[in-house]
Amino acid sequence: MFRFLSQTGKYFLLLKKVFSRPEKPSVYFRQTLFELHNLGFNSVGIISIISFFMGAVIVLQTAYNTENPIYPTYLIGLTCRDMLLLEFSSTVSGLILAGKVGSSIASEIGTMRVTEQIDALEMMGVNSASYLILPKIIATLLFNPVLTLLSIVVGTLGGWLAGSTAGVITSEDFIYGIQYAFIPYYVTYAIIKTLIFAFIITSISSFQGYFVEGGSLEVGRASTRAVVFSSVLILLFNVILTQTMLS
Amino acid sequence: MIRITGLEKAFSGKVVLHDINVSFESGKTNLIIGKSGSGKTVLLKSIAGLHEPDKGEVWFGDILFNKLDFNSKKEIRKEMGMLFQGSALFDSLTVEQNVKFPLDMFTGQTPEEKIDRVNFCLNRVGIVNANKLFPSELSGGMKKRVAIARAIALNPRFLFCDEPNSGLDPITAIMIDALIRELTEEYSMTTIINTHDMNSVIEIGENIVFINDGYICWEGNKDEVLRSGNELLNEFIFANSMARHLLSPQKSED
């Protein structure tokens, strides 16, 4: 319990340091652009591939488990849309990014710590926490919503392709289904969840990397902890946000 | 000048530095020598502000450095340069970007002025045609020299070197020592070097502090170090047979 409280305190003290005034905004801006490419654009591929196949599976599973004349087939399209919007594109993408981006952040910052690069920044008078972490947080807050929207579009496309190719739903029914009873608030809900998950992934992973002590073994452990803690917190906040935003 | 009074530091209850009182003069190469694990690096990092001392005072000139707040410390740190044991160059930046980094962060110079300064510093440490290389493409000696170039980019008043010769061949080590001494004299910096390299002690030890198990056991200079009469220091200096053969006072008198 004491360890949990001390780690939580350390985490918030780190955040205080991260959100202090940057030494040179132009340098931070350049670093943010670099992180947008590194953490954002580089995740487009994996998110697209996974979303495409998940959309396809959602449609096929829904079709095979609702084979009943009572259910109109356009409900398959509606189910695909709502599953992507409500859970998959924000939460499951968040978990995937916790693995990809989270481990990358923790190992990058952890390696900088054990090779004294963070000490070198501090020696120069640079706020190392802010310089290393703030651009990453800004980049993921800006780009992860784009990834979520991309995931919704690609997942829907995957569902439509799989459904029409397997012959479980016609294109007309699918398109009707994805437009039927559309609630725009679900998009807002997905974006808000994405923003919170992006902050969790980046800040938790940075925290794990920043306080690494030892060598490469500890960097590996920090990287694993970053993924585990980020994933658990994403799932916890998913429950809290679902209850508070959809109830 | 840097002055340390009553400095103590412990980690998890284990005291690493005991009541350290010492002064380091400007324009001189000040050496901290001692065995591995004797507390040299902790002392250097406590002076540089990378470790917070548990007790004692660290004075930079007439400024009590370790009692300053975060922002005031940042201002003083702009006047410090540090050469780390593993060079600590930023992996993702080229040689040029590494040396330019402090200029980008803390000066309002134009891009041309910054490049001029970078080239001057790199030339000063003998690095040519390597601006676009990444640290992973450099040899150990080149990394150290680039790290020195980065450390002097902002004309620091204080230079800290943590085992600058570790992992280097004797010829490159002598070159690095000579470079540090020249820069110290040229910029009249207060330079503190951690080392257990006896060659450095003999070559550039203008002021030497011997530390053992966290205590300062001896102070002097390179002319006195071989005839100190201090048992612990002699044990350290004449640890290997080459040193015993070449440096022992009896041998010198012969």
Image (spheres, rainbow, N blue to C red):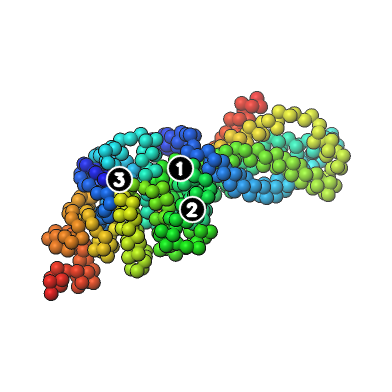
Which chain is disc 3 placed on? Answer: B
**Labels 1 and 3: the sequence-earlier one:** 3
Of the residues shown, which amino acid type is indicated by label 2? Asp
Asked if A149 appears above or below A114 in the picture, the reply is: above
- In which quadrant of the rendered view does residue A31 lie? top right
Residues at marks 1 and 3, CA–CA distance in whole angstroms = 22 Å
Which residue is pictured at 32% across the width and 58% down the height? B182
Q: Where is residue B243 in the image (x, y as percent from the top left)?
A: 22, 69
Task: Kindly check if marks 1 and 2 are in contact, taking CB atoms under 8 A apart as contact.
Answer: no
Which residue is at the front of the view, B58 or A86?
Answer: B58
Q: Where is residue A99 in the image (x, y as percent from the top left)?
A: 57, 47
Whether callout 1 and callout 3 share a subunit is answered yes
State the SS at label 2: helix
Which residue is pictured at 83% across the width and 49% down the height? A165
Q: In this view, does B22 lie to the left or right of B147?
A: left
Residues at marks 2 and 3, CA–CA distance in whole angstroms = 32 Å
Which chain is disc 1 placed on? Answer: B
Which residue is pictured at 83% across the width and 39% down the height? A174
Of the residues shown, which amino acid type is indicated by label 3? Ile
Q: What residue is disc 1 on?
A: B106
State the SS at label 1: helix
Which residue is pictured at 24% across the width and 49% down the height? B25
Can you say which quadrant of the picture contains the N terminus of chain B?
A: top left
- In which quadrant of the rendered view does residue A179 lie? top right
State the SS at label 3: helix
- In which quadrant of the rendered view does residue A87 lie? top right
Q: What residue is disc 2 on?
A: B116
